[in-house]
Amino acid sequence: MILEFLKEYFTIILFLFIAGGLSFAFVVVNFFLSPSNPDPEKLSAYECGFEPFSDSRIEFDVRFYLVAILFIIFDLEIAFLFPWAISLGNIGTLGFVSMMIFLFILTVGFIYEWKKGALDWE
């Protein structure tokens, strides 16, 4: 029983071992070969505009949360669109209409965020 299982899934198990070994090797090589003296540009504020080593309890603008929520919404939209597009021939009219309703709701939400100024950065 176990031998038959290993025959069927040998390539997947081999792939997992190779991927795990390569990942571990890359982390170890990076640990030993990376420079340990970062330049001032690397230690400067990045993207959000805050110093990287300040107090973790500082307040920051709620727009960061709004952008993150928008990213999650549209990331989930793409996650639903790929399987839907592949099975479009099998799901019929009901599947098509339900996805159009889903996309319409997401579009209304996007327009609402846009009109409220969540995407305007000052």
Image (cartoon, rainbow, N blue to C red):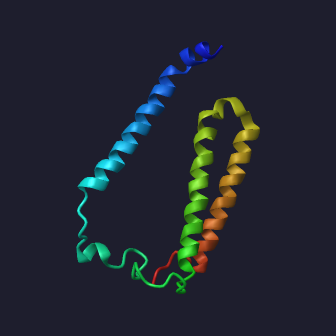
**Residue drawn at (64%, 72%) of the image:** 112
Seen in the picture, residue 95 relative to 5 is either above or below; the reply is below
Q: Name the residue: 46% across, 80% down.
A: 121
Residue 72's place in the image compared with 1, above or below, is: below
Picture residue at 66% right of the left edge, 65% below the top: 108
Q: Is residue 38 left or right of residue 1?
A: left
Q: Residue 80's x, y, as percent?
A: 63, 46
Of residues 46 and 85, the one drawn nearer to the viewer in this rendering:
46
Of residues 61 and 55, the one nearer the viewer is 55
Residue 35, quarter of the rendered image:
bottom left
Q: Quadrant of the C terminus?
A: bottom left
Image coords of residue 42 (percent x, y) = 29, 72
Q: Is residue 34 or residue 79 the one in the foreground?
A: 34
Q: Residue 15 location, x and y as percent?
A: 45, 29
Q: Is residue 43 left or right of residue 72?
A: left
Give the residue at x 41% y 32%: 18
Q: Where is residue 111 in the image (x, y as percent from the top left)?
A: 61, 69
Left or right position of 46 against 34: right
Total numbered circles: 0
Answer above or below: position of 38 versus 34.
Answer: below
Q: Which residue lies furthest to the right in this view?
A: 94
Task: Report the quarter where the N terminus lies.
Answer: top right
